[in-house]
Amino acid sequence: AQVFVNVGYLTWMPTFLHEQHGMSLPMAAFSALFFHHAFALLGVTAAGRMSDLWAARRRTARMEFEYAGLLLGAPFIVLMGLAQSTTWCLVGLSLFGLFRGVYDSNLFAAPFDVIPPQLRSSAVGLMLSCAFVVGADAPVALGWLSEPLGMNAAIAWLGAAYVLGGLTALTAV
């Protein structure tokens, strides 16, 4: 879910900011990446530290950070897509970045809590391969959805992928 949303976001957000919010292409590209990744940096560092501390007491802590990142990030994806003002769109994409960082902070650590050391590289390879295959479909899916729904709604629908991924991780815990 995260890679699908991230690839769709990275592919379409500069165009979206340019077309829907009137930004110049250089400013749209900068805004789409800088604010999102700056907040992701905050999320990944803070959540990484917190999950390490909590994992010492709770075996499921890292997986809990993953589903929390997805479920808490979903509303901000919707806000980003449906915001009428540029300010609210940037708030949405920034907070989506923050919670993406929360999820990313445990991307590799969570599976390592349950996968034996001799299988970890294979597990990471399989996980990333599946993520890349699914993520590659995101730009096409957004383009396809944007024709009948508009780009605003298509981007907002990425929140559904986060909810689906979050509920899957919650179930796995």
Image (cartoon, rainbow, N blue to C red):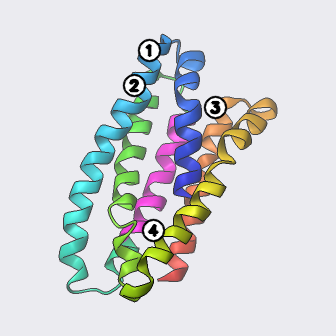
Where is residue 89? Give x, y as percent: 46, 30
- Tell me which numbered mark, 2 or 3, is placed earlier along the sequence: 2
- The kind of residue tagged 1 is Pro
Which secondary structure, mark 2? helix
Query: Any mark on residue 152, and which?
Result: 3
Q: Amino acid at mark 2?
A: Ser
Query: Which residue, given by chain and number where applicable, does mark 2 sit on?
Result: 31
Q: Nearer the viewer, residue 137 or 74?
A: 137
Image quadrant containing the N terminus: bottom right
- What is the span of residues highlighted in magenta in the rendered image? 65-81
Residue at numbered disc 4: 67
Q: Is residue 53 magenta?
A: no
1 or 2: mark nearer the eye: 1
Badge 3 amino acid: Asn
Can see residue 115?
no
How far apart in space, not on screen, are marks 2 and 4 (Cα)?
27 Å
Whether 70 is among the magenta residues is yes
Left or right for 121, reference 52:
right
Type of secondary structure dominating the magenta stretch: helix
**Nearer-N-terminus badge (2/4):** 2
Residue 106 in the image, given as x and y percentages of width and height: 35, 67
Mark closer to the chain start, 1 or 3: 1
Distance from the alpha carbon under mark 1 to that under mark 2: 9 Å
